Image: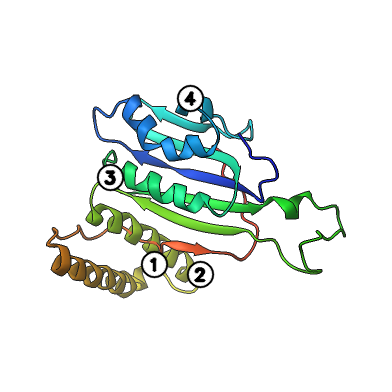
């Protein structure tokens, strides 16, 4: 599944709850950008990860959940593949969900200790990157999971310095930020109001350090 001389090993990780009745054929069509990028002719042919210890891409038919812990070789153009896949998964998702995508610099990993690549300046760091993608049946559902993650991350950071009972105002401030964002969306698209009380995390990506692989 890995492309020859691919500059990155790309790891996709996350669980997406699916609507009742979603078939394997529908899921295969939604994930077509993914498995065609991997050079396969079907989802089944691409479902195994580049690493045997990773479960790959699986449909839990009993719980109606798409499970992804999958690595493929690729380049920056894989980001467009992810955008297309997420748009398709929106129509199949039962609730908001987050997908973690990590770009590992394969050239950096392949270098012998003390050896510099011909294309890399001496002392340069790995080009690793980490980005969150979100899917959901509605913008409200997507904002809900974004808020949940943001609250979780913020509380985890601040509880190092404050008791959790002191952080109610912080959560309320996060709620107001998401309410403001959604109100702007309502004004432009006339959508329903999102639920309150659970959700959060920033979208977009950031570099900064090698991140561990996710294993089930």
Q: Nearer the viewer, mark 4 or mark 3?
A: 4
**At which x and y percent is residue 45?**
52, 25
Mark 4 burial class by Cα count in 10 Å: few <14, some 14-19, many 20+: few
**At which x and y percent is residue 47?**
51, 30
> Which comes sooner in the sequence, label 4 or label 2?
4
Q: Is residue 115 left or right of residue 91?
A: right
Q: CA distance from mark 2 to mark 1?
A: 9 Å
Mark 2 burial class by Cα count in 10 Å: few <14, some 14-19, many 20+: few
For label 3, the residue is 95
Q: Is residue 193 left or right of residue 170?
A: left
Q: Residue at x 48, y 51 (%)?
A: 100
Residues 129 and 177: in front is 129
> Which comes sooner in the sequence, label 2 or label 3?
3
Q: CA distance from mark 4 to mark 2?
A: 45 Å
Outermost residue, right direction? 114
For label 1, the residue is 164
Label 4 with label 1: CB-CB less than 8 Å: no
Q: Quadrant of residue 53?
A: top right
For label 4, the residue is 44
């Amino acid at each position: 599944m890995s492309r020859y001389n691919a500059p990155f090993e790309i790891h996709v990780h996350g669980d997406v709850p699916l609507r009742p009745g979603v078939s394997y054929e529908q899921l295969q069509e939604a994930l077509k950008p993914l498995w065609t990028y991997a050079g396969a002719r079907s989802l089944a042919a691409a479902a195994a990860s580049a690493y045997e210890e990773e479960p790959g891409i699986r449909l839990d038919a009993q719980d109606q959940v798409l499970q992804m812990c999958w690595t493929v070789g690729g380049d920056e153009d894989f980001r467009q593949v992810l955008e297309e896949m997420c748009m398709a998964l929106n129509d199949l998702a039962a609730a908001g969900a987050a997908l973690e995508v990590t770009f590992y610099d394969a050239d950096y990993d392949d270098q012998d200790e003390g050896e510099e690549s011909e294309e890399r300046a001496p002392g340069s760091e790995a080009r690793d990157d980490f980005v969150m993608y979100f899917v959901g049946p509605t913008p409200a559902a997507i904002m809900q999971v974004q808020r949940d993650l943001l609250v979780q991350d913020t509380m985890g950071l601040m509880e190092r310095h404050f008791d959790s009972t002191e952080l109610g105002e912080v959560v309320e401030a996060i709620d107001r930020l998401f309410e403001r964002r959604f109100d702007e969306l309502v004004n432009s698209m006339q959508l329903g109001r999102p639920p309150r009380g659970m959700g959060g995390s920033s979208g977009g990506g950031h570099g900064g350090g090698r991140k561990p692989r996710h294993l089930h």
